[in-house]
Image (tube, rainbow, N blue to C red):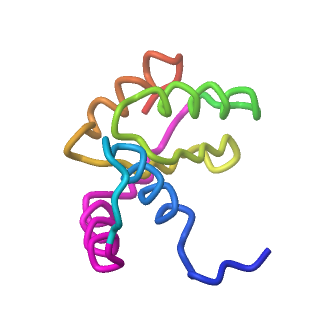
Amino acid sequence: MSNPNNISEQGREVVNSFISSLSLYSDLSPKTLKEYIQKEENKMEKQIIAVEGMSCPHCEMAVQQALMNLDGVKKVKASWKKKQVTVKMDLELVSIDKIKETINETGFQA
């Protein structure tokens, strides 16, 4: 299915989050939505973190699940082959130190 509004996956998530957080449904101007999306996307940061000890897809899943449980983590992609994890996060809600601590608590070394 084509995406006539040309909205990224993250943009859709932000819009859905925004709409879900409204206590009253009201007419939202496109400008209001665009400003909110831009503000939220500007808060996101992508980090690639080296991770030692992952040896299989199960290890990837363990790291991904642990990180997705943290407030502020929006997207995670772990790769045991590349020995790294890519994390998209809101640094106002979660720190890189907390990301690394969680990886270490999962049994791997960040």
**Residue at position x 30%, y 29% in the image:** 98
Q: Quadrant of residue 1?
A: bottom right
| Residue 47 part of the magenta segment | yes
Q: Is residue 29 above or below residue 90?
A: below
Whether residue 87 sits left or right of residue 37 in the image: it is: right
The quadrant where residue 14 appears:
bottom left
Q: Quadrant of the C terminus?
A: top left
Query: Farthest residue toward the right?
Result: 1
Q: Position of residue 89 (x, y in %)?
A: 36, 48
In front: 29, or 46?
A: 29
Question: How far across and down, in percent of the image, does residue 86 sit?
Answer: 50, 51
Q: Which residues are magenta?
A: 29-52
Please name whichever residue, 74 or 64, is drawn nearer the observer in this view of the structure: 74
Q: Nearer the viewer, residue 50 or 100?
A: 100
Residue shown at 76% from the left, 32% from the top:
56
Q: Residue drawn at (39%, 29%), measured in percent from left and top?
A: 70
Looking at the picture, how far across and down is residue 5, in whole percent? 57, 81
Tell whether 77 sits left or right of 34: right
The x, y position of residue 63, in whole percent, is 56, 29
